[in-house]
Amino acid sequence: MAKMMNNLLIKVYQQILIRIEDKAKFKKDYSEVVLARKRLRAENRINSFEDNLSAKCLVLALKYSVNNDATKELIASKVQKIENKFYWRKRALKTSFERKSAKAEDKSAVEKTFFDKARELDNELSKEIETINQKYSGIKSNLEQYNTEVKELEIKTLEKIAQIERKSASSLEDFKKKTDNKIELLNKFGKYFKDKLFALVDQTKINNYGLDEDVILRLDNLTMRFGGLLAVDHLSFDVKEGEIFGLIGPNGAGKTTVFNCITKFYKPFDGKMYFRKNKIDTVFLNDYKVHQIIKQGIVRTFQNVELIWELTVIDNLLVAAHTLFKTGFFGQLIHTRKLRQEELVLRKKAENVLTKIGLLAYKDSYPLGLPYGILKKIELARTLMVEPKMIILDEPAAGLNDAETLELAKLIKMIRDEEKVTIFLVEHDMGLVMDICDTVCAISFGKRLAIGTPKEIQENKLVRDAYLGEE
Amino acid sequence: MLKLKNVLANFKKQFLSISKHPYFGFIVLGLIFLFALFLRNMGLLTISVINTFTLVMIYSVVAMGFSLLLGFGGLASLGTAGLVGLGSFIMGYFHGIGGMSFGMTIVISIIIALAVGLLVGFISLRIEGMYLAIITLGLGEMLRQFFISYDTFTGGFTGTSLRSFKIFGKLFESGNDNYFNTVYIIVIICFILAMVATINIIKSPTGRALLSMKNSESAAQSMGISIIKYRLLAFILSSVFAVLGGVLYILHTKFSYPPQWNLSYSLDILAAVIVGGAQSIYGIIIGVFLIFGLKVSVLNYIPFFSNNPALIVIFNGVLIVLVVMFYPGGLIRLLQTSWFKLKIKLAKIKMKWRTYRYGKDDE
Amino acid sequence: MPGIDVAVRQILIIILGLIAIYAALDLFWLRKQTHKSLYRSRALNVLIVLSILTMIVISARLFTLPIIIQILLLNTIDLSILILATTAVVLIFKTSVTTNFAQGMMATFGAFFAASVVMKLIDNGSTNMTLILFAGLFAGIVISFLLGLFIDVMIIRKGKNVNSVGKQMITMGLVMVIMGIIPVIFGSNPIVLPAFSVDVKIFNIGDYPMVIPVQNLYAIAITVIVLAALFIALRFTKWGLGVRATASSETIASMMGVNTHVITAMSWAIAGGLGAIAAFFYASMGTQVQVASMVPVQVNAFMAAVLGSFGSFGGSIIGAILINVFSSIAPYYNGTWQLVIVYGIILLIVLAKPLGLFGKKIAKKV
């Protein structure tokens, strides 16, 4: 009785802990996004003030003609502008003259009017240039006035910049303090529950279905039957935490069926599957439905790329983050503030993931029409959105060329090392499997042939027979 | 002088940033419709134009719900007519005959829509694709038979008529301008609210979940999207929109009779959504206008068509066939692409004029 | 009538009992079996057959068997029409994977043409009525055949990447077009075609005299002949093989050298011809045929195809027979709610067997 009570309490505490941790994490992410935004905004404002100052200084310099070079430059630019304008007018005149002269019989008359008009234009041009020169060169230099005015301006601007800085810093600090306070409070709560939880865990021998410390997934006599066909036949193996585990076998050996059983696309006919969700919680996978698997920490990719073609790449990643959205339907109906915050945070996260995989350039394009290698990578990126414990890859290298496969191998290793996830893959490309896997399991007709390091598998006679046929 | 310029520039910037907000277009559209009412009261527009606008708005509400189902959820249903009819009879019975308050009637209609949506949703869990379309067609026919036979509720073949309605304690009797204007404004408000709700759903996790359910069910499931939940949701949403459309319909036309809610009405809604473009709100409005409004507001004034009413039907049919054959994304896609092409053409014309005036560049 | 209430109650009790037995079986025995899904579908089949038998038996006891047979005999013309329409719908579904909403309209067009031919011949002074009617029927079939051919070759196939919903929409548009064209060509009056014969034939089953109109016999005979020819063609000709290949996968069939264009065009044409026969008999039933008269028949044909499964001709014909039986007996239970009753029964059956009575499930690969 007490044990049951304890188990129940453990579950309750865990739920509370997950909620608190989620909330704290969200607050932290959100504050980061907001702080970055606020900082950028303040910087932009300051920059614009500085730009303004320099522009105004230049105007003053012209006004009091302190800087000869600047005046000359200004005059030159104005003259250039006018000359350009007249160039086009002349050209228009010339083309119209050519058209007319081609048609007209009396060419000399047309020519005469043309030359008259051209002369008029030239006169106009020289007049305008003269007025400009007069306007700007007639000013007397007055350094004192200039200096005082510039100083005034500088003081004013600096004051404003300082004000902005102060303001933004104080608001940033306020915001940070507020969120930090909240996060601290949440952490306190979290710690309280964590302590209680661990105390309870220490007290009770929790039911982890007899899984060893380092095992993350255990299949126990998994059997799957389609009508009369035995696709998976009493298959059992363990996957250790943090390793890259490869499942190999000839065509039709039931590899993908195993995946589909783990992710509950098929209901296993017989057998048990256990998954270690975290240190204290082990789940019995048979009890869950397809869409609940991702919440336990298992994400998969597909043999044929299954993307949402009508959404952009980043929206595809946000679909994967579906379970991370906490706003309910009615919140979505009126687009509450919370939903917008969540959207902001998760979009940022998706961008980070895309940067990590190297796909940021494809952020806003639609997946339809992208190269196959990129599509496979998008699927991989999609799995990283939920920070899973285990990623299941169904033939990640199928349809890729050698260079792409090599790159993929690197990427898979990188993900394993950086995200600390377990990777479980089915693959036909033996090179890839032998290169990256820590443990390999070979199956044939649903039965386990051998399990061990890649080297052991390579030397195993049964495996070789299954692949090459018995002699 | 300089300051004024600054203020103007600032204003322009702000206006541009506001006009990018999706709600902006909806409110502008609502204001245009409101302006039409103003024009009508000035005597510049005929009443039939206003009637067309009202019907277009009401049917757009229905079609938006339907597009959530078809364009996003990828689920075909041909029972829309029954649901719209249900809405109109609920309003006619509970408010018109039973004397229940307006708000209460809306609540009841939403509850009934929820129940029907749930029922069809559960059916859709077992039956899929074309089979589902036919079964919902059957359900629509069943509802129509129900309307015809259950005459205490619907008035049988003669139908229900709504003489007056009461909102916020004010009574509006049919037959005068006051009633007409009030209904028109109510319809505009509902229309804008429906558009806002639709865009909010589309641009939220729910919209993405519906789309992913349509594109790849297995991917959706493995990403934690429950197919059951979102199918039910899609059907519930579409039936709530349809029932509300029915409520607005009886407010506007003041009567509703059962044989009107037949298969061809459902097919018209489907056609409107497909012709306009199933995933764009403006596309849906264009589609609804083409299917329901074009005849009343434009073609009737062209002598060639008004002399041969059969030609209007042919015109509509040919329009649907051509759009589906050559513009699978709907008319809205056509408008977008042609706008783009127009821009390119304008640039080319500008270039030609330049070479005419200035001659060819020597370089 | 109190007897009807009792009968309804009996039917409900027996069916509920059957469902309860099935549920118990499912709970205690089926779930532990190795071939779970197979047994389950078999049990469901038995359940459905028993339910239908219950309804028929109890109805027979209520109205007595001879009356039931008499009712069914009188409705054979409806049955022929429904079977023809259903076969046409299924034929198009198999080759083009779409439900043809224009089916009824194509048929009505044929009937209107037939009627105008018949009128012309009568005006010209022909007196042999049977011959005139056969000529009209033939003309109607030919025109609908050509119409179907035209629709597929000139419209459906010319579309740019049109999917099955798109094809459905095109057929909807065609409904409007044909609906507008018919009054332009044939005038806006509804038509009534004369029957082949207005006689009735009386014969005995046991001691009970039975009545069947000769017109029904004509309808049955023509339906049987046409369907037999169609099935022989499907079974033994190259075209039939092509239809079956196209039905399973159009791309693969065309890669294997089947000219899918010819196959689909012929299917549309034949569907048009079948529809024309159906509409012809519908018009000769004494009711006025207007432009939209065939719509209920078409809806019933869709329901029959769903009930029996879109995938198989035989199944859909059985679906059509079931619907005909239900809808001829239902009015005697309750005149106002007959449609609800019939569609409700179909809905329940389809809920139990989502792919129709004879549909086969194809496992989807993930």
Image (cartoon, coloured by chain):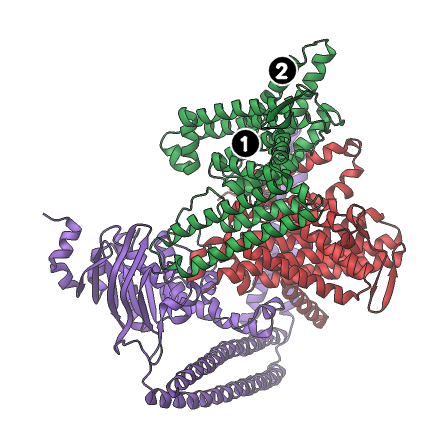
Q: From what the image shows, is residue C304 above or below residue C15?
A: above
- Please indicate, yes or no, whether residue A173 appears anywhere in the rendered image: yes
Quarter of the image for residue C259 reads: top left
Chain bearing mark 1:
C
- Tell me what hue chain A is rendered in: purple
Q: Which chain is green?
A: C
Q: Which chain is red?
A: B
Q: Name the side, left or right, on which C155 lies relative to A198.
A: right
Q: Residue lying furthest right in this view?
A: B176
Label 1, label 2: how many angstroms apart (C-alpha)? 22 Å
Q: Name the side, left or right, on which A449 lies relative to C314.
A: left
Marks counted in the figure total 2
Q: Amino acid at mark 2?
A: Ala
Q: Report the front residue among C349 and C269.
A: C349
- Of callouts 1 and 2, which one flags the residue occurring earlier in the amino acid sequence? 1
Quarter of the image for residue A382 reads: bottom left
Q: Residues within 10 Å of mark 1 (few under 14, many from 20)?
A: many
Chain bearing mark 2:
C
Label 2 residue SS: helix
Label 1 residue SS: helix
Q: Residue C88: which disc?
A: 1
